[in-house]
Amino acid sequence: MKKLKTIIKIYFLLCILVFFQSFFGLKKKYACGIDVFVRTQGLAVWYFIVPISVIIGFVFLKNEMNYNMIVRKKNIKEIWLDILLNIFHSGYIITFLLFLSCETIAVLYGNFYKWDETTSLFYMLTRGTLNYLNLKFFIFMYLVSTFFYVVISQLLVQVIWWWTGNYVMGMLVTIGLFAVLIRNGLPWLMRSGVYYDIWTAPISNFYQFIFPILLIVVLIGLGYLKRKRDFL
Amino acid sequence: MEIIVNDYTKTIKGATVLDHVNLKLHSGVCYGFKGKNGSGKTMLMRAISGLINPSSGYVKIGDKQLGKDLSFPESIGILLENPAFLDNYTGYANLKLLADIQGKIKEKEIKEALSAVGLDPEDKRKYKKYSLGMKQKLGIAAAVMEKPEIVILDEPINAIDEEGVVLVKKIIFEAKNRGAIVIVACHDKEELMELADEIVEISAGKIVEKKEAV
Ligand SMILES: Nc1ncnc2c1ncn2[C@@H]1O[C@H](COP(=O)(O)OP(=O)(O)OP(=O)(O)O)[C@@H](O)[C@H]1O
Ligand SMILES: [Mg+2]
């Protein structure tokens, strides 16, 4: 029950953010709902997802890292596993909620899919070359990159906390690093943007899937390497 | 069962907070930690709980060494300086959450523990609406509800009214009688003498005296 309430709160928060985005975006004539989707989902991923997931991680630690819970755990590995489970849960929950709130706005917009219109944002960004694009695949790529954003940013901040005990430092490092990466464009995050050269470039399985998964595995492993830890 | 603290030293950022501590604790005895503010009573409790790791030395619970054979004692209940619970849960829900981690006890035992400290198990108020003393009582209930072999209570009667103090004493007495190792810290000398069988005096991270309470 409590978890559900938290989820609903996050959902409304996301809705508000997305609403403001699309509101400001209305100035840039959208031809159809999926344009709005592209715009809102892309911007949300870029600007909100990392800070939001870092805050969720903090709330989790505040609630679950108290001595009462810790001494009841079998060992320190189990505590790390709890942290990981929370990261993955929040990963797919946020991905789903963000998708839902962006979709809601897109559907409300009316004309859902009109990429062959020359006034379409997508048409403009892809210079009209991509109106044959597979919509399902397109949305799938958005979901995958959102999920990776959430999971990798949270993992990074938790690994830093796990090793140094300093959450604020992890937060600054993570938000800073992602800000730089997003500015400069990372191959495995690229499909969250909608630009001509991105969508005309062939999909690289390595950058889109294997690299982020490797990164996740390495970060998880780094947590397991820590055998002893002070809980002050 | 026995707890052995052997030549335990803990340094945090250059400050020695526990200094070559040697201590043996036995079942069915209540130990009273005594010492000035900042002397290391709470730290020693953390060391025994496995919440901190030694810079040198070790803690053994029975024949198992903390940080080597296990991370935390298998059966322990603790209350440290401030009770740690979730703000938006009721007292019962908080205890249930903790009890479910190990699954040793059910609703009945949780409610018994709440009644034993003088809290109403049916109270629907959230933890954040609790008074200071009620929070403290909930902390004590959490520490003893699973009837652990080790019970650590850091200043348990802080903020607790007279009636409550009687209940806490009863709880400590019961824990002792069923064979638990009980550790309490308390700044009130007379209360400590009454609660504890043995007094362990700590000063600047060192044990300076261990004697029978009289
Ligand atoms: N989280 C912490 N990080 C670093 N040092 C700490 C921390 N908590 C306590 N200390 C230091 O450890 C030493 C012992 O503190 P401790 O809390 O064990 O004292 P205490 O005997 O319980 O005091 P009190 O009677 O005030 O509760 C002190 O010098 C304190 O400054
Ligand atoms: Mg203390």
Image (cartoon, rainbow, N blue to C red):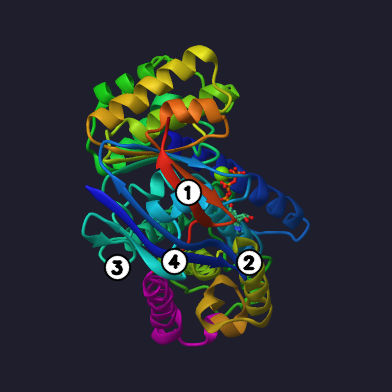
Q: Which secondary structure lies at badge 3?
A: loop
Q: Is residue A18 magenta?
A: no
Of labels 3 and 1, the one closer to you? 1
Horizontal placement of A197 versus B5: left or right?
right
- A29 vs B49, nearest the viewer: B49
How many neighbours does mark 3 have within 10 angstroms: few (below 14), some (14-19), or many (20 or more)? Answer: few
Residue B68: which numbered mark, if any? Answer: 3
Tag 3–tag 1 contact (CB < 8 Å): no
Q: Is residue B113 above or below residue A170?
A: above
Question: Hey, what amino acid is under mark 3?
Answer: Lys
Whether residue A137 appears in this view of the structure is no
Kindly identify which numbered label has been placed on residue A46: 2
With respect to residue A222, does A33 lie above or below? above
Q: Quadrant of residue A169?
A: bottom right
Foreground disc of the pair 1, 2: 1
- Number of the front mark, 2 or 3: 3
Quadrant where the N terminus of chain A is found in the figure: top left
Residue A219 covered by magenta stretch: yes
Comparing labels 3 and 4, the label whose residue is closer to the camera:
4
- Magenta extent: A199-227
Q: Label 3 marks which chain's residue?
A: B
Is residue A160 rendered to the left or right of residue B66?
right
Residue, x 43% and y 64% (percent of image)? Answer: B8
Q: Which residue is mark 4?
A: B54
